[in-house]
Image: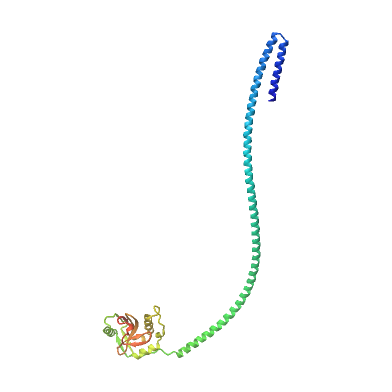
Amino acid sequence: MDICATQVLGAKMSILNWFRKLICKQDNLELTQCQLELEDADDLVERVTAQLQKDKDEITQLQTTLLTERNRLVVLTNQYSNLQGKLDTQIRKDKDEIIQLQTDLLTERNKVQVAIEQYAILQGKLDTQIADSNTLNKTLTDNIEKLNIELVALKTELDITKEELAQKEKDITPPTPTFEPAGVIDIYELSSLLMDLFPDAPIYLSDETYNLCTLEDVKRFLAWENTDSFVYESKTFDCDNFSRRLGGGIEIYPWATIPFGIVWTNLHALNCFVDSNKTFYFVEPQSDNVRTSLEAWQGNEIRFIVI
């Protein structure tokens, strides 16, 4: 702007000079020359004015751009402040977390130190216990060897005692009773006898012939045999178990040759036999009671007979 003003001022001074010359000089040629110079000055003024307006417009544009950039700078400054605030907050947070981690690390380090000390204590106790255990094992080994020696001696004594007891039992146990056969009955005669007594009952006979003995012989065997000493237990050792126990107990020579068997009724299981008089008897295995007929509690219907 200063250059343009200077140029304008110079132009005006030139005009004044030209007027002076015009006044001073009467020569038309000079006047004409001044007019031409004045025209040139007007052109110059116009150009300078146009340039001045252009510069003014550029300055206005620059001011607008400057204002825009200033506003952008303000926005960026605010953004920077916000980011700086967030960064400061994050730094403080990270610093707090680092402090907390350091505290936790110190705590865990202390715990590890305590654990190491406890481990050392426990290791010491374990070493002591191992030493004690080794001593105890040696003591136990010595004791076991002594006990083995004593057990061998006791076993020897026990074997001797068993032999002595077996001999004494043999001496005091009554011999198995026996009998002299008082007759023989074959399968046909026995089957006929039983069918006459129990026409509706299934009868199963296993041998072709049987030796017969007296009623007293059977009672002597029952007194010697111990099935009646067992305890009745419902569903585990009841009447059918008693009858099979006595039926199995008589399966020794010579008693296995007599017609002795098992009877099942509608209420009970018991034993039976036929004596030398060819009389049929019921035997209650739980009491060794011998009868020719059933008691009421034993039932009233024969289901089957096996001899």
Residue 3 occupies which quadrant of the picture?
Answer: top right
Is 291 placed above or below 46 here?
Answer: below
Q: Residue 62 versus residue 210: which sits nearer the camera?
A: 62
Image position, residue 62 (x, y; %): 64, 30
Image position, residue 216 (x, y; %): 35, 91
Residue 143 occupies which quadrant of the picture?
Answer: bottom right
- In the rendered image, the residue lying farthest to the right is 24
- In the rendered image, the residue lying farthest to the top is 27
Image position, residue 73 (x, y; %): 63, 37
Q: Residue 46 versus residue 140: which sits nearer the camera?
A: 46
Residue 212 occupies which quadrant of the picture?
Answer: bottom left
Q: Quadrant of the N terminus?
A: top right
Q: Quadrant of the C terminus?
A: bottom left
Instruction: Please give the name of the residue rendered at 36% of the width and 89% of the height, measured from the top-left corner.
Output: 219
Is 293 placed above or below 49 here?
Answer: below
Horizontal arrangement in the rendering, residue 162 relative to residue 244 (left or right)? right
User: Taking the image as drawn, is residue 8 in sight?
Assistant: yes
- Figure label count: 0
Q: How is the image coloured?
A: rainbow
Instruction: Please give the name of the residue rendered at 34% of the width and 90% of the height, measured from the top-left corner.
Output: 215
- In the rendered image, the residue lying farthest to the front is 23
Horizontal arrangement in the rendering, residue 135 relative to residue 157 (left or right)? right
User: Taking the image as drawn, is residue 180 in sight?
Assistant: no
Instruction: Please give the name of the residue rendered at 66% of the width and 17% of the height, measured from the top-left corner.
Output: 42
Q: Residue 107 versus residue 59: which sits nearer the camera?
A: 59
Horizontal arrangement in the rendering, residue 244 relative to residue 110 (left or right)? left
Image position, residue 296 (x, y; %): 32, 84
